[in-house]
Image (tube, rainbow, N blue to C red):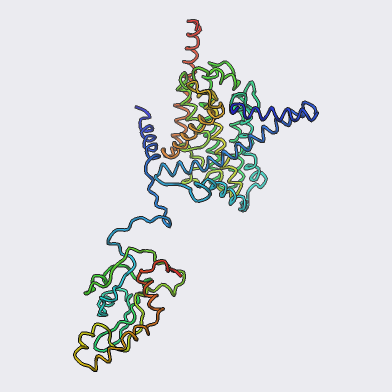
């Protein structure tokens, strides 16, 4: 019953529309629209929750209590903050490129939303099960670089410009180890389809067969989302807030929410590629598959948050050096070893 | 080993995550104040002999004492501290011979209006006649006995309001604070 909750809702909607006697294509389009709206709501609710969770985790790791005044246990804190940000004026700097300046926070959510369309949240719960899913995800996810650059350039501010240049440098150099890390998994499965990759992990998760790939992926992913220890892009203490320096009100909030949505994307991706997606461990099948997916995703998100409150920020040269001199060669070596291993297994005849 | 420090850092934050939280949510709960805390002053009016030693000891001239002579004795009518100039050094408390002036542990002395700031420890009117303490001496003469009669009258004559004020100021009625 619970297992098929969301699939059941989709089927019910489809049959309801079928009963109305409208053409099949329109029905499918409406169902698809409903799915995308559901994903949008899901992202926003989760982003709100993640901001709250981040503050709570930070407080707990610093022996504080954290937000606990607004709503029960402080749960409405983010809602109140967003309410405040909506009511604030969006100040546009004097010599800013107004169109691009305003377009950047509007578009920042687009790649994130597009990426979520292919993520399978549970058994048969991907909005679209694309046959090049992984490739699509990586291609779209790196698009957000463009919007950071747009915001930074259009602000006409030195901090924004430095910050957005760092975004481009960092994202381009960490995209490579990220992709190379995932390549090991793709080689073993022989498919870029998300459902195939998850199906291949029914017995053994790829974190056990590809531990180095997981490490490389996770480190690169943390860098991709501009989180500490790779948050040179925002670097509050040196360049104010990087590309967001000149933004205020809801424009800033959009960047902020997009950052948390991106954390969700990379953690969901890590879950799919390395932690068996929605597969239940130890045969605990009675818990629905989507609950397992969220559980794994949130454990990874917690680890990302723990990183933030544990490690100090690294320097730009350390960042570049680590990316190009450590992660990329390691990823290449991993691919090489994986290839040799696969050939050996084939020769043995497993 | 490479990365050993990173793992150690994660262990520390993980341990801290479950550790006791140190926050004291102030208006709801208060942090315990040390025993010899220099807070608001309390004056034991019955012990005070209005010698003005405390006023002389004060480096900032915070303390104002007004007294009247009632019979042979000094009767203190006002003991007001301009607490906004007080630096809580404690010299007045140390100088008190009769151990009448004390610190309390109450540090919440903020007021809504500036005129409420001075700490009024005593504000009362002097009785027309000498009071109680001289009663044993009064036994000597009959004429003095007759004089002793209006004692209770003098007490009731005392306006009730200043008494309440001094009670608030002495920290005996903290619930009336800031009103």
Q: Position of residue A289 (x, y in %)?
A: 56, 26
Residue farthest toward the top in the current orientation of the protein: A348
- Which residue sits at x=57%, y=38%? A46
Q: Please name whichever residue, B157 or A40, is drawn nearer the observer in this view of the structure.
A: B157
**Residue A77, image x, y percentages:** 53, 48
* Residue B166 in view in this figure: yes
| Above or below, A162 relative to B39 | above
For the point 37% across and 48% down, the residue is B22
Q: Is residue A313 shown above or below B148?
A: above
Q: Give the left or right position of residue B79, taking residue A235 as reference.
A: left
Quadrant the N terminus of chain A occupies: top right
Horizontal placement of A347 versus A27: left or right?
A: left
**Residue at the left extreme of this rendering:** B140
x, y (%) of residue A61?
41, 41
- As drawn, A64 above or below B119: above
Residue at image coords 31%, 67%: B88
**Does any portion of residue A181 appear in the rendered image?**
no
Could you say which quadrant of the image residue B71 lies in?
Answer: bottom left
- Give residue A177's position: percent from left, percent from top: 51, 26
Q: Nearer the viewer, residue B18 or A211?
A: B18
């Amino acid at each position: 019953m619970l297992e098929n909750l969301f699939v059941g809702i989709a089927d019910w909607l489809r049959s309801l529309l079928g009963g109305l006697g409208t053409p099949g294509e329109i029905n499918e389009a409406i169902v698809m629209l409903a799915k995308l709206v559901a994903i949008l709501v899901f992202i926003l609710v989760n982003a709100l929750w993640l901001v709250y969770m981040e503050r709570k985790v930070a407080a707990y790791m610093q022996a504080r209590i954290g937000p606990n005044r607004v709503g029960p246990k402080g749960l409405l804190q983010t809602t109140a903050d967003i309410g405040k940000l909506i009511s604030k004026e969006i100040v546009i700097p004097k010599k800013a490129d107004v169109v691009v300046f305003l377009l950047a926070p509007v578009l920042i959510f687009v790649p994130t939303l597009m990426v979520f369309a292919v993520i399978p949240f549970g058994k048969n719960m991907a909005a679209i099960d694309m046959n090049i899913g992984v490739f699509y995800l990586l291609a779209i996810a790196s698009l957000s670089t463009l919007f950071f650059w747009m915001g930074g350039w259009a602000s006409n501010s030195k901090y924004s410009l430095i910050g957005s240049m760092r975004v481009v440098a960092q994202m381009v150099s960490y995209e490579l180890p990220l992709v190379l890390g995932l390549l090991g998994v793709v080689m073993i499965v022989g498919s870029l389809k998300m459902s195939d990759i998850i199906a291949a992990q029914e017995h053994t998760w790829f974190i056990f067969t590809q531990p180095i790939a997981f490490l490389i992926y996770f480190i690169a992913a943390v860098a991709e989302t501009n989180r500490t220890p790779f948050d040179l892009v925002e670097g509050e203490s040196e360049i104010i807030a990087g590309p967001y320096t000149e933004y205020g009100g809801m424009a800033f909030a959009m960047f902020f929410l997009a950052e948390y949505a991106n954390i969700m994307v990379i953690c969901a991706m890590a879950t799919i590629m390395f932690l068996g997606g929605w597969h239940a461990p130890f045969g605990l099948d009675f818990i629905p598959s989507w609950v397992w997916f969220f559980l794994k995703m949130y454990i990874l998100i917690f680890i990302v948050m723990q990183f933030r409150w544990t490690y100090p920020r690294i320097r730009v040269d350390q960042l570049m050096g680590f990316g190009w001199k450590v992660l990329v060669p390691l990823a290449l070596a991993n691919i090489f070893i994986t290839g040799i291993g696969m050939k050996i297994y084939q020769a043995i005849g497993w | 080993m490479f990365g050993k420090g990173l793992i150690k850092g994660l262990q520390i934050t993980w341990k801290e995550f479950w550790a006791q939280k140190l926050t004291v949510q102030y208006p709801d709960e208060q942090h315990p104040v040390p025993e010899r805390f220099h807070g608001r002053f309390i004056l034991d009016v019955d012990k005070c002999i209005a010698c003005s030693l405390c006023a002389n000891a004060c480096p900032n001239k915070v303390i104002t004492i007004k007294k009247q002579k009632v019979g042979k004795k000094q009767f203190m009518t006002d003991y007001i501290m301009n607490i906004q100039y007080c630096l809580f050094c404690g010299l007045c408390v140390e100088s008190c011979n009769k151990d009448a002036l004390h610190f309390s542990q109450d540090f919440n002395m903020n007021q809504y209006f500036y005129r409420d700031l001075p700490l009024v420890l005593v504000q009362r009117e002097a009785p027309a006649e000498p009071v109680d303490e001289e009663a044993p001496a009064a036994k000597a003469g009959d004429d003095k006995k007759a004089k002793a009669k209006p004692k209770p009258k003098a007490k009731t004559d005392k306006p009730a309001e200043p008494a309440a004020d001094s009670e608030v100021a002495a920290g005996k009625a903290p619930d009336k604070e800031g009103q």
